Image: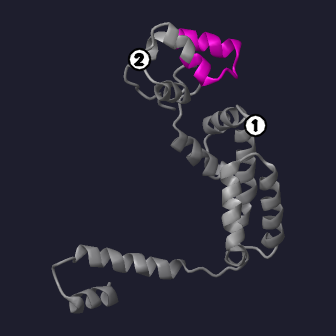
Amino acid sequence: MLRVPKYRASLVDPYREHLRKRRTEDPGVPVQHLFEEIKTLGFTGCLNLLHKYINQGRADADRSHISPRRLVRMLLTRPDNLKPEQHELLAKLTAACPEMTQLASGIRDFAPLLTPHTDNTDALTHWIAQVRTADLPHLHAFTRGLDRDIDAVIAGLTLSYSNGPTEGVNTKTKQIARQMHGRAGFTLLRHRILLG
C-alpha cells in the first residue's frame, strides 16, 4: 500500500481550492500566473514555495503523492519485480506528460544493453540516435558522456569481463583501513587483509 506523506501546514494551504480550480480549467497555466493570482488574494509566500507545493502534488486532489526518488526507483526497477499496483501507478505517472513517456521508453530500451552481448554495439548506436531526437536534455548530456568514452562503453556492453572483483577488494581494504585508523601499524593491516 502506498503511504501518503504527512505535510506540515503551508502558507499555500488557504489557496488550495483556487489552485485546483484554475489547474482544472487550464492544466497548462504557468505557475507564475498562479502566483500572481494568489498574491492578489493575500498570499504572502514566495514563488519557490508555490513551485514546491505544486510539484509535491498538494494542489491536485487526484494526483498521486509520490516522491521523485520513489518514481526513479520504480522506473529503474525490473518490470518483473514491480507489484501490480506499482505497474498501474507507473503507467499513470509516465503517461502524464510526453517527456515522462519518452524517458520511460528510453530507460526500457537501454536496460537490455546492460547484459553483455556482441550485438550491443549496434543497439547502443541506435539507442543514442533515438534519444537525441527526444526533448530530454539530461539524456542528451548522458549520451555526450557515452560518446566521450565510447570504446570503454562498448567494451563494457559487449565483453563478459568485469573489474567487479578488483573493486570489491579495494572496497574491503578501505573498510579495514578505516576500522583500524590510528590503532595499529601497517603489519597488522597487512595481516588482516591477507587473512580476511
Image coords of residue 131 (percent x, y) = 77, 54
Residue at the far top in the pictured view: 41
Please report the bounds of the magenta region as a residue range. Answer: 16-35
Q: Residue at x 42, y 16 (%)?
A: 44
Label 2, label 1: how far apart the Cα atoms are: 31 Å
Image coords of residue 148 (percent x, y) = 68, 71
The quarter of the displayed image where residue 82 is located: top right
Q: How is the image coloured?
A: one colour
Residue type indicated by callout 1: Pro
Name the element at disc 1: helix
29 displayed left or right of 182: right
Residue 62 visible in the picture: no
The quarter of the displayed image where residue 33 is located: top right
141 displayed left or right of 129: left
Judging depth in this view, the residue of 44 and 145 nearest the camera is 44
Would you name the residue on which mark 1 appears?
Answer: 98
* For marks 2 and 1 on the same chain, the one whose residue lies earlier in the sequence: 2
User: Mark 2 or mark 1, which is nearer to you?
Assistant: 2
Name the element at disc 2: loop
Q: Is residue 166 above or below residue 116?
A: below
Label 2 crowding class (10 Å Cα cut-off): few <14, some 14-19, many 20+?
Answer: some
Q: Is residue 26 above or below residue 75?
A: above
Residue at the far left in the pictured view: 183
Residue 122 visible in the picture: yes
Residue type indicated by callout 2: Leu
Label 1 crowding class (10 Å Cα cut-off): few <14, some 14-19, many 20+?
Answer: few
Question: Magenta includes 111?
Answer: no
Would you name the residue on which mark 2 appears?
Answer: 11
Q: Residue at x 50, y 25 (%)?
A: 47
SS assignment for the magenta stretch, majority? helix
Image coords of residue 102 (percent x, y) = 75, 44
Q: Is residue 26 above or below residue 103?
A: above
